[in-house]
Image: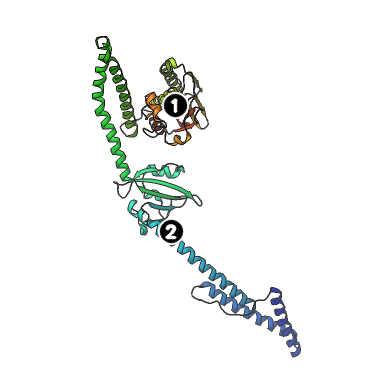
Amino acid sequence: MHYSWSRYLRLILLFLLACLLFGAWMGYPLVGLLLGLAAYFSWTLVQIRRLHTWLSNPDHYVEAPGSVGLWGDLFDGLHRLHQKHLRLRDRLQTQLNRVQESTNAMREAVVMTDSNGTMEWWNGAAEYLLGFRRDTDLGQPVHNLLRHPEFKTYFDNRNYREPLSIRSPAKPHIHLQIQISLFGDDDRLIVARDVTRLTQLEQMRRDFVSNVSHEMRTPLTVLNGYLETLLDSVDDVAPKWRRPLETMNRQAGRMEALIKDLMLLSRLETDEHQMDDEITDVRKLLEQICQDARALSGDRAHQIELSIDDRHFLYGDEGQLRSAFSNIVFNAVKYTPDSGLITVHWVTDRDGAHLSVTDSGIGIDPIHIPRLTERFYRADPSRHQDTGGTGLGLAIVKHVLLNHDGQLEITSHPGEGSTFICHFPRRRITESPEAA
């Protein structure tokens, strides 16, 4: 039976009043009241001891202690809360067990750490791929086990948009792709995937492209040499052979440009090409590229405008930067109608340096933009046949910017032209050689 607090108070007062009256009847009213208070206090101490014993080990006592009045209601209420807590705990434990079982079934290694990198939990695949051991590694900093400088930098930078590729510390022949996600109070969820097969296939592709390019370059050089010789003495050749020779020479030139781009891309992708970081005069470089673009435009009479900020010295490889910048500017010339406007703008701000190339060309459907930097991807294959493009220009731009810690931004709409922006970090901006 449950009573309100006012009912409990009235019962206590009635009990004390009864003790007072009993004491008065015996001739000692104060003694009767004190004896009543002492009895109630003793009973209360007994209930407190029973409550303490139960709360000290609630799982040992299935049922709550029995009592009456206020303490009976208190025991019953705590017992209900305890049973509700047990049901909730069992339900959460069941869900946690299912999550752990499903995570342990994954082939990817999953590791949970706190904000400082202290490992709190990992699945079975992490023991195989990363070499973690539950009996010794729990609570250890993840940097003590993944001793890769690249991983430490990646972990601390908090920029996890792109994954990190490293070798497994436990099995060096395994290539891993690391992806980190933030959750909770700046905690980390680390997922490592085995990408050994993809890495091997990618290496095979690079080797194939590199070897084929080198092997094709020699016979193609011979063919070009003979074709140029025949075209130089075209007056001595029968008229019916002039057009085939010119077509052969033009197509051989396209193939030579393709092989040249393939070899450059192969060098950018592999460790064969060592970057020659130096102070590059962007003003001088862009002026030369714009001059070459005007020559490429020829009779098409494009308007090419160039504006350059005062801070025009960049720390990087001038050869790579020339390839990237010229690809973007020359593409603008190729895909802009005659007499169209092309603006080349170099500007620096608090975020870094930015080269933007805007044209008034035919534009690109935004659906193609995410794939434009893929090798041989063509938004409109017919356009490349007309312009002689190889489909590798923007792939080269992408890798050059990656080598210079930069990013490529593309905005375009059909019929509204296109804008290509190369973003470089602020640390790449430097002073002139004389000032340095």
Q: Which mark is residue 245?
A: none
Q: Residue furthest bottom?
A: 26
Pointer 2: what residue? 99
Disc 1 is placed on an element classified as strand
Q: From the top left corner, tell me how far across and down residue 140 is, in percent.
A: 40, 54
Residue placed most toward the observer, 297 or 286: 297
Q: From the top left corner, tell me how far across and down residue 128 is, in percent.
A: 33, 53
Q: Is label 2 in contact with label 1 (beta carbons under 8 Å)?
A: no
Q: Is residue 354 visible?
A: no
Name above or below for residue 398 compared with residue 96.
Answer: above
Name the residue: 30% across, 27% down: 259
Q: Quadrant of the C terminus?
A: top left
Pointer 1: what residue? 314
Q: Quick one: label 2 or label 1, which is nearer the N terminus? A: 2
Q: Quadrant of the N terminus?
A: bottom right
Q: From the top left corner, tell me how far across and down residue 22 is, in percent.
A: 73, 88
Asked whether, in this view, residue 114 is left or right of residue 320, the answer is: right
Displayed quadrant of residue 321? top left
The three-letter amino acid code for the residue at tag 2 is Val
Q: Is residue 266 visible?
A: yes
Residue placed most toward the observer, 238 or 359: 238
The three-letter amino acid code for the residue at tag 1 is Leu
Name the residue: 29% across, 22% down: 252
Disc 2 is placed on an element classified as helix
Residue placed most toward the observer, 164 or 399: 399
Q: From the top left corner, tell me how far across and down residue 218 is, in percent.
A: 24, 24
